[in-house]
Amino acid sequence: MISDITLGQFFPGNSPIHKLDPRTKLLLTVAFIVAVFLANSPLAFFSLFLAVLTLVLASQISFKVILKGIKPIIYVLIFTALINIFMTRGEGEPLISFYIIKIYKEGIIRAFFMAFRVILLIIGTSVLLTYTTSPISLTDGIESLLSPLKKIGVPVHVFAMMMTIALRFIPTLIEETEKIMNAQKSRGADFSSGSLIKRAKALIPLLIPLFVSSFKRADELAIAMECRCYRGDKNRTKLVKLSYKPKDFLWFAFGILFISLMIALRIIPQHISGSISEELFNFLFFKI
């Protein structure tokens, strides 16, 4: 399970999304997040699905990698879905009623779309940002977008570098955790059997060596940066200067149109979206 986590990893490539300016991808990521939270109807979610599918195909990232990125959050999705199913109250008669447990059609619909929203959010942001953007490009993009804050004394370069290092340390920590787990398994530790609470307690001995290793790596990184005379953005030059290209403006136009579509779908009268949701529910749970 740990080796399946792809958060923070960069997959080099030559796809149209890889070639985009990092600032373009950062702004599109923000726009996509806004669009995900604006979606409140089946038609809007279907539009999001088509947009994510387009991004995946354009990035040329393997579907196997995409699925591996979703696998670690399955339990979070199940928990989120159950909370929505049991806590949502509908207007009509419940589909299932057992003592205090009542499951309504509205709860199932909300659980389905909530889980779908989380999946689309993770896939879209990963494909747009971490999977297709190198650490150096990501740092330069964040620093360039936040450069106006330098006028009020905000250490933009330090902030961008800190965010990028934290993001790129995730795969390193995952790899270190897996090594520690394998070492303890060879000494008789059991992480896969027993109840959920027992397995959670078995992971506690991993924390101390993991923290020690993390602090050691952080110290080594700081020493390496000092040895290379790193002094933040003071008198710092860049090998590659960022510049927008026509394809960046084309993707900007796509993002604006997509946000406009989400806003338009959101202001559609509620009785229309409600009838569509009911038809989708009946198709999924009664006709199939």
Image (cartoon, helix red, strand yellow):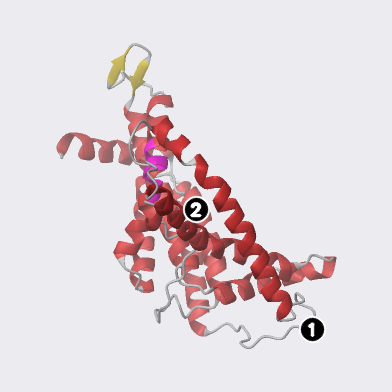
Front residue of 73 and 14: 73
Quarter of the C terminus within the rendering:
top left
Residue 130 in picture, x, y percent from top left: 49, 66
- The three-letter amino acid code for the residue at tag 1 is Asn
Residue 106 in picture, x, y percent from top left: 36, 30
Extent of the magenta region: 72-78
Residue 126 in sight from this viewpoint? yes
Residue 66 in picture, x, y percent from top left: 35, 61
How far is the residue under mark 1 from the one under mark 2? Answer: 44 Å
Question: Is residue 279 toward the left or the right of residue 69 in the image?
Answer: left
Vertically, is 90 above or below 285? above
User: Quick one: label 1 or label 2, which is nearer the N terminus?
Assistant: 1
Q: Residue visible at 51% across and 40% down? A: 204
Q: Residue furthest top?
A: 99
Question: Is residue 8 toward the left or the right of residue 47 in the image?
Answer: right
Q: Count the marks: how many?
A: 2
Q: Which mark is residue 235?
A: 1
- The three-letter amino acid code for the residue at tag 2 is Ile
Front residue of 234 and 48: 234
